Image (cartoon, helix red, strand yellow):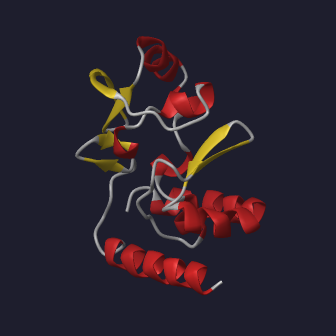
Amino acid sequence: MIKNSLYLLLFFAVSCREAASPKPAVYSTAEGAINGYDAVAYFIEGKPVKGFDSLSFTWNDAQWKFSSQSNLDSFRNNTSHFAPKYGGYCAYGLSRNYKAQTSPDAWSIVENQLYLNYNKEVQVEWKKDMDNRIAEADKNWPEISDR
């Protein structure tokens, strides 16, 4: 309990600092969108898989990387299905009305949509009330997506 509380406190502190500056619609790092991980692999392989520079695609002002040509083609042909919700920002953070970075290993597929979280500890909290958190994030995202 105390460990989870400390992780959430750290999450909120980092998120509040990050919230001060505008962020693009897609969570990206120097590695690319969603830390350079293959969004399609979460669905196909059931785990995070790092993408390659040679298999990349620009969409929504972000560079998406893939681990296979097949995954790149799948994403290109159906971005609305394979792109993570909320541009790859933390679903828990969005439910609380702010954007926060995500970790590739803190993920869930719910009703055929990919959701990412800040880390596994935050993901545990998100899953405790996932349906309500998704409803809140869905409500918040239109206003937050461009700030």
Q: Classify the position of the N terminus by image quarter.
A: bottom right
The residue at 40%/82% (across/down) is 13
Image location of residue 34, percent across then percent down: 40, 44
The residue at 33%/78% (across/down) is 17
Residue 19 in sight in this render = yes
Q: Nearer the viewer, residue 54 or 61?
A: 54
Q: Nearer the viewer, residue 136 or 111?
A: 111
Q: Above or below — where is 72 with respect to 144? A: above
Image location of residue 111, percent across then percent down: 75, 40
The residue at 47%/62% (across/down) is 144
Outermost residue toward the bottom in this view: 2
The residue at 41%/23% (across/down) is 67
Side of 32 where 77 appears, left or right: right
Side of 21 where 138 appears, left or right: right
Total marks drawn?
A: 0
Residue 80 in sight in this render = no
| Res. 100 image quadrant | bottom left
Q: Nearer the viewer, residue 48 or 14?
A: 48
Outermost residue toward the left in this view: 30
Image location of residue 140, percent across then percent down: 58, 64
Q: Classify the position of the C terminus by image quarter.
A: bottom left
